[in-house]
Amino acid sequence: MQYEAQIRLGFFFGTFGLMFIWEAITPYRQLVIPKPLRWFNNLILVMLNTFLVRAILPLSAAAIATFAKERGWGLLNLFSLSPWQTVPLIIISIIYLDLVIYWQHNLFHRIPMLWRLHRVHHADRDFDITTGLRFHPLEILLSMMIKFVAILVMGVPAIAVVIFEILLNATAIFNHGNVSLPHQVDRLLRLFVVTPNMHRIHHSIITQETNSNFGFNLPWWDHLFKTYRAHSVANPQQMAIGLAEYQQTLQVTKLPWLLTMPFQSR
C-alpha cells in the first residue's frame, strides 16, 4: 500500500510521544534500573530488529496480503464480496489476527525453545513503554513469519493488515506504560482493550501470573480461554517485575546479553 510505512511510523511515534509525556508527568512505579541505561539498550534493540526485518524479510505483511489477493489465495479471497461487506470483513480480519497473536504469545510461554526467545522481553526488571518494544530479533522474525502464514491462509485484506498493525503497535506501547488509570476507567477499558494494570500482572516474577493475561490488544481471549487474572497477589506498585533468576543483576539491560540470552544455559 502506498504510504503504508509513513502512516505506521506516524501512529507509532505519536503513541510513543503521548505515552512518554504521560509517564514523565505521572509515573505509576519507581524504576529500579537507571532509565537512560535501560532506554538506550532497549531502543538500540528496536532499531536492530527493524533493520534485520527489512533486510531479511523485504516484503511487509500488507504486501503479502496484496500478493495473496492477486493470486486468489486464502479463504476470504475465494468469495466475491460486495462493497457493503468490506467493513465487516475488515473487522473480522482484525479480530482473527488478534486471536493469532494471542495464541502465538501463549505458545511462546509454553514451548521451551520459544520461551528462550521470549524471556528477553520478560527479563526487563522495569515496566514501561520501552518494555513493549523489547524483543529478541529471532522472535521478531519468527512472529513475522507466523503473521505471513496467517494472512495467506485466511486471505486477509491489506487494509485490515495495516489497521491491525497500527492498533497492535499502539496498544503494545499503551499497555506497557508506567502509568495508572482510575479504577472505574480501567474496569471499563478492560472490556475492549488490554490496560497497563492488566498487562503488568503478566510481567510479575510469579510464574502463575506470568502465564496469564496473554492478550496484547483485545482482552477477550484471556476470558474465553481461562487465562485472565484480574489482580496480582502483590501490591502492583511494589510487585517484582521480570524473571526471578535475574533480579540481582544489571546484565538484563545490556544489549550483548539480550542478544545472547536465548543461548545461555541459565
Image (cartoon, rainbow, N blue to C red):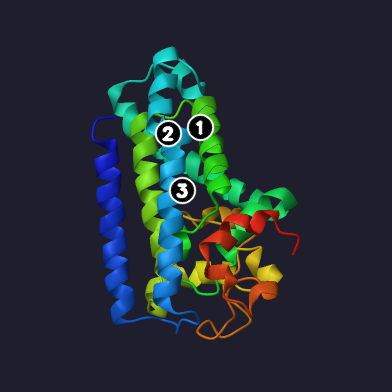
Q: Residue at x 57, y 45 (%)?
A: 138
Q: Position of residue 85 (x, y in %)?
A: 34, 28
Q: Is residue 132 visible to us here?
A: yes
Residue on which disc 1 sits: 148
Q: Earlier in the sequence, mark 2 or mark 1?
A: 2
**CB of mark 3 within 8 Å of CB of mark 2?**
no
Q: Earlier in the sequence, mark 3 or mark 2?
A: 3
Residue on which disc 3 sits: 49
SS class of the residue under badge 2?
helix
Judged left or right of residue 263, residue 146 is left
Judged left or right of residue 97, residue 241 is right
SS class of the residue under badge 3?
helix
Q: Position of residue 49 (x, y in %)?
A: 46, 48
Q: Residue at x 59, y 64 (%)?
A: 122
- Amino acid under label 2? Ala
SS class of the residue under badge 1?
helix
Viewport quadrant of the C terminus: bottom right
Residue on which disc 2 sits: 61
Viewport quadrant of the N terminus: top left
Q: Position of residue 105 (x, y in %)?
A: 59, 51
